[in-house]
Image: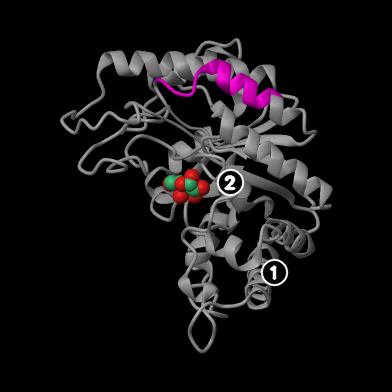
């Protein structure tokens, strides 16, 4: 039985992508080539991998993914230039010890962006420039981080300027999670408006899309898309997956997903894709955070010793019920 290709089914709507790493580009190569039209490096383009020590750039792993994408006619999303996580400590330390000052941090940021976005110029057509700068809880607007504390909020503006300088053709994104939570959504909107006032070259918002069977509600996702779209930027869904556990469910005993979980997951994915298609003028790309359920960052996270099944293809790369229902939203049978 031949299986429909997501990339083909949604061709008139948006790109369909997957996050890959140096192992899954081999282990899931056939599935990736058949189904996806865009790739994101799960970790290989992050600062911890591309510049482990000052001035020491390592691109072998990132190149492997960029070469795979180019070799198979796929797009490449760059991920990620400036983040508080997976960034080596040396970035923030003064040469003689102690915290580095604002000027040093900005120089390092610029050098890093120039090297990384410069290397993939013409290959990565867009970049997640700043990842997760907004605070999750409470009144606080921006997350406390070394970038924020030592440079000030304008570190975000500078990151976009440097990225534009390094690759003037790349589309530049602000990317975040819990992006449908109304309080956090409004902080993200405040950030994007402020960036535009500051003249930052920002083109899009990345809605990460790490969801589960209960949350966010489809109404919340719709509301978030509408509000983001009002900012006049494009939207990419950058890291979509759907855990079969609620956030506070700590069970570790399941060896496989229950029938109820798979049905609920299929229903939610169908609702999401129906919604994405309604907003296809603004949503230009939908990337899953993985290719199939045999490898997902959600195995062992946030609960150790637990498996998860968050994607459209099972552990043997066969389409799940969720796949069939997603395809159905485009008016074709799987
Ligand atoms: C965030 C980052 C991703 C990845 C996930 C977990 O969403 O943006 O790069 O690290 O966390 O896999």
Residue 224 falls within the magenta-colored stretch? yes
Question: Disc 2 versus disc 1: distance between alpha carbons?
Answer: 24 Å
Q: Where does the image place residue 98, in percent across and percent down from the top left?
A: 49, 81
Work out whether residue 287 or residue 163 is closer to the camera in this orientation and state it: 163
Kindly report which numbered mark, 2 or 1, lies closer to the viewer in this rendering: 2
Q: Quadrant of residue 180?
A: top right
The segment highlighted magenta reads 214-226
Q: Earlier in the sequence, mark 2 or mark 1?
A: 1
State the residue position of label 2. 134
| Residue 153, above or below 251 | below
Q: Quadrant of residue 273?
A: top right
Q: Residue at x 61, y 26 (%)?
A: 8
Residue 231, image x and y in percent? 77, 33
Q: Which image quarter: residue 277?
A: top right
Badge 2 residue CB within 8 Å of ligand 1: no
Instruction: Report the front residue among 107 and 203.
Output: 107
Classed neighbour count for the residue bearing mark 1: other residues with Cα under 10 Å, few (<14), some (14–19), many (≥20): some
Look at the numbered discs 2 and 1 and tell me whether their residues touch, using CB distance below 8 Å. Answer: no
Which x, y percent locates residue 326?
Answer: 51, 18
């Amino acid at each position: 039985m031949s299986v429909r290709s997501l990339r083909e089914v949604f061709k008139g709507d948006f790109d369909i992508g997957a996050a890959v790493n140096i192992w899954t580009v081999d282990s899931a190569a056939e599935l990736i080539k058949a189904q996806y039209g865009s790739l994101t490096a799960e970790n290989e383009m992050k600062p911890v991998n591309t510049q482990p020590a000052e001035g020491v750039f390592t691109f072998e792993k990132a190149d492997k993914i960029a070469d795979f994408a180019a070799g198979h006619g796929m797009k490449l999303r760059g991920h990620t230039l400036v983040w508080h996580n997976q960034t080596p400590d040396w970035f923030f330390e003064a040469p003689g010890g102690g915290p580095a000052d604002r000027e040093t941090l900005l120089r390092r940021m610029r050098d890093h962006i120039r090297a990384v976005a410069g290397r993939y110029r013409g290959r990565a057509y867009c970049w997640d420039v700043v990842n997760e700068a907004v605070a999750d809880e409470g009144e606080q607007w921006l997350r406390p981080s070394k970038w924020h504390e030592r440079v000030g909020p304008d570190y975000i503006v500078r990151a976009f300027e440097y990225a534009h300088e390094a690759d003037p053709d790349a589309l530049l994104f602000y990317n975040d999670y819990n992006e449908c939570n109304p309080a956090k959504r409004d902080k993200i909107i405040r950030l994007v408006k402020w960036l535009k006032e500051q003249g930052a070259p920002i083109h899009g918002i990345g809605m990460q899309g790490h969801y589960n069977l209960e949350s966010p509600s489809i109404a919340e996702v719709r509301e978030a898309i509408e509000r983001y779209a009002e900012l006049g930027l494009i939207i990419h869904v950058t890291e979509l997956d759907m855990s079969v556990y609620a956030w506070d469910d700590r069970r570790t005993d399941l060896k496989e997903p229950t029938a109820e979980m798979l049905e609920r997951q299929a229903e939610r994915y169908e609702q999401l894709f129906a919604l994405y298609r309604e907003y296809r003028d603004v949503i230009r790309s939908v990337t899953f955070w993985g290719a199939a359920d045999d490898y997902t960052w959600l195995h062992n996270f946030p609960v150790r010793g637990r498996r998860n099944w968050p994607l459209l293809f099972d552990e043997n790369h066969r389409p799940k019920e969720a796949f069939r229902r997603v395809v159905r939203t485009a008016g074709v049978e799987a």
